[in-house]
Amino acid sequence: MTYFNTISKINYEGAGSTNPFAFKFYNPKEEINGKTMEEILRFGVAYWHTFTMDGSDPFGSGTMIRSWDKFKGMDLAKARVEAAFEFFEKLDVPFFCFHDVDIAPEGDSLRETNQNLDIIVSMVKDYMKTSKTKLLWNTANNFTHPRFIHGAATSNSADIFAYSAAKVKKGLEVGKELGAENYVFWGGREGYETLLNTNMKLEMDNLGRFLQMAVDYAKEIGFDAQFLIEPKPKEPTTHQYDFDVATGYAFLQHYNLQDHFKFNIEANHATLAGHTFEHELRYARVHNMLGSVDANQGDPLLGWDTDEFPTDLCSTTLAMYEILKNGGLGRGGLNFDAKVRRGSFEQEDLFHAHIAGMDSFAVGLKVANKLIEDRVLEDILDNRYMSFTDGIGLDIAEGKTNFHELEQHALNLGEVKHQSGRLEKVKATINQYLLRAYTGE
Ligand code: XUL
Ligand code: CO
């Protein structure tokens, strides 16, 4: 059965196209430095937002009109797989991502849930034999069901800790079965609402032990995916233990897990933490911990996770700058952890949304690549930090000096001349590059 009957394959038609069902900037086969856009950008579709969620919010019920919703239970799960692979093919997207509960309904017991999962996983595996779309990552949803009311690996209940472990164990087996490139840990409820009833030390130690057991089990079964922590500061909890990349990195180092994990960085999680998207990418990159990206954007006027499709070209440019400087995303990708607005309830909106996101990152890629080619930001940095390239500065940078020498240097200093930061000039230059990207000037 088919579900998107009025829509055919989305092709690249160029910046002047007026066809809403065409890419204007994302040209999968176009090469940039010897790699195609498709290979660099590694786009993924998030199963939950696109095929499972219904548009409900805390104030209103679902609005999405989905042709597969006429089915129920396992039939609905199967219909979603059919619809998903039709969508992937029409969008010509190389990856998808899912939580266990997105693809198969929970049964009355964990055993039954696993059986449901097995049926759908074997169906997905069959589709993957003929589809080009691969699994970027899967994960366990250890936050929606009421059993996770007080957390999963950080629950006060040891039984729930065990239940959560069983779900991740199954997730690792599923990831291996489907050849997942990565496995994601987003600590949905791994945090607290109040310290007044929380044993922070025990909860964090348990989370460390949980992740170590996951590493051990993946090794045991020969599942070689890259493990990813996805930081988020709050929501649904008041405070999440994986607040941001810096906090997550300290956590990983404390529990000696840093060699087994990288980060999956989500734009809207960065802004909830009070950072820019590019800050989180930069922090991960300079520590060699940038693994993958959940591509979306938040609403600066709202204090919660709005998961909008990314359309801010300045943000996609600065994000692609970090990704290119990282030498690419490796086994990671750009997963659209993004949902159409509640008012965009028609199926064709799913295409418009993904086309908008893919085109926005394609622009970001081209502009960032040009900025790097012309050494725009590199020259600024070289010039700005020049004082560390010889004399006392070089000694500092090479760790060859001490407070005695530095004091002598300071005592003999005359007036120190500063250079302007030229912030406005830099911003104007970025705008110039953005606007020039397609005029060819
Ligand atoms: C929630 C979120 C999740 C993770 C996977 O904010 O981003 O969907 O990406 O569990
Ligand atoms: Co996410």
Image: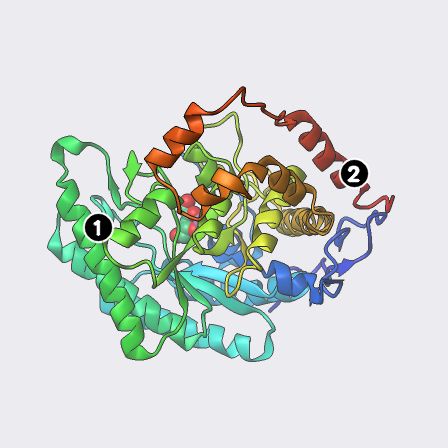
Name the quadrant of the N terminus: bottom right
**Which residue occupies 56% across, 52% down?**
66
Name the quadrant of the C terminus: top right
Residue 149: percent from the left, percent from the top? Answer: 22, 44
- Tell me how far mark 2 sits from mark 1, CA to CA: 51 Å
Report the front residue among 347 and 372. Answer: 372
What kind of element bears circle 1?
helix
Residue 428 in sight in this render: yes
> Measured along the vertical axis of the image, is residue 208 above or below residue 237?
below
For this orientation, the residue located farthest to the top is 415
Quarter location, residue 163: bottom left
Q: Amino acid at mark 1?
A: Arg
> Measured along the vertical axis of the image, is residue 70 above or below residue 423?
below
Whether the residues at callouts 2 and 1 have beta carbons within 8 Å, the answer is: no
Task: Name the residue beneath numbered marker 2.
Answer: 435
Is 149 on the left or on the right of 76, as rendered?
left
Residue 378: percent from the left, percent from the top? Answer: 64, 45
Mark 1: few/some/many CA within 10 Å (<14, 14-19, 20+): some
Residue 300: percent from the left, percent from the top? Answer: 53, 28
Q: Amino acid at mark 2?
A: Leu
Is 290 on the left or on the right of 425, as rendered?
left
Is 240 on the left or on the right of 338, as rendered?
left
